[in-house]
Amino acid sequence: MSLLLRMKKRTRVSDAAEGDVVVLEGKVAEGKAMTVPGTSVKCVAYWLLTEAWQHGARGRGRKMWVPSNQAMRTEGFYLDDGTGTIWVGGTEEALELIGGREEAGPMGKKGKARYFCRTIARGDTVRVQGTLDRPRGSEPGDSLVVRPGPKGILRVMLRKKG
C-alpha cells in the first residue's frame, strides 16, 4: 500500500476543497505532542508494539518474547505544504501509520518487557491520504480537517525525517 500512496498525485493545500479525497505532502508544522506510553519518546503520531518475556501460548516450555499490546495513535497535527496549512486528525481505529522513526528498547525495571515503535515528529515530511471535512468539536477551526478516506482509513506515511 505504501508504494501506491507514494506514487499517487498529490493535491496542494491551497487547491483542496471540502469533500475532496486528497493526498497531501508537507512538513509536520506543529501538533499535540505526546509521549509514547512506557517510554520517553516524544511525537505527534505513533505505532507501538510491546512484548513480554514469558512462556508461550500453551504456558509450557521455554520463555520467549510474546506480543502483549499494539497501539496506534495521534491527537492531530498541522501539515504545511508551503501553500497553506491543514489539520490532520485521526482515531486509533482509522489510523494507518506507514514508516516512521524507529525506536526500540526495554520497558520496566526488571527487563521482562520491551517495545518497538514508529513515530512521526515535528519537522518530518509526511504524505497523508484522506477526505477533507469541516472541523468538529475540539479540532482547530482555522482550517479544513483531513479525516479517514472512503475506506475508513487515514494513511500517514513518513517521507523524510526532519
Image: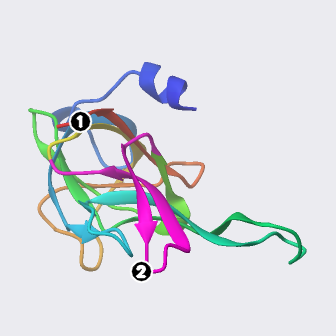
Between 123 and 19, the residue placed more toward the observer is 123
Residue 161: which disc?
1
The way the protein has been coloured in the rendering is rainbow
Kind of residue at disc 2: Lys
| Residue 129 shown left or right of residue 71 in the figure | left
Assign a secondary structure to mark 1: loop
| Residue 18 shown left or right of residue 112 in the figure | left
Residue 124: x and y in percent read 21, 40
Which class describes the residues within 10 Å of circle 2: few (<14), some (14-19), or many (20+)? few
The quadrant the N terminus occupies is: top right
Residue 125: which disc?
none
* Up/down of 148 relative to 74, above or below: above
Residue 126: x and y in percent read 29, 38
* Up/down of 35 relative to 20, above or below: below
Q: Residue at x 22, y 30 (%)?
A: 12
Total number of numbered discs in the rendering: 2
Magenta stretch encompasses residue 101: yes
Between 66 and 137, the residue placed more toward the observer is 66
Magenta stretch encompasses residue 112: yes
> Which region is colored magenta?
98-122
Q: Residue at x 50, y 65 (%)?
A: 114
Residue 122: x and y in percent read 16, 50
Question: Where is mark 2, residue-wise?
Answer: 109
Question: What secondary structure prevails in the magenta region?
Answer: strand
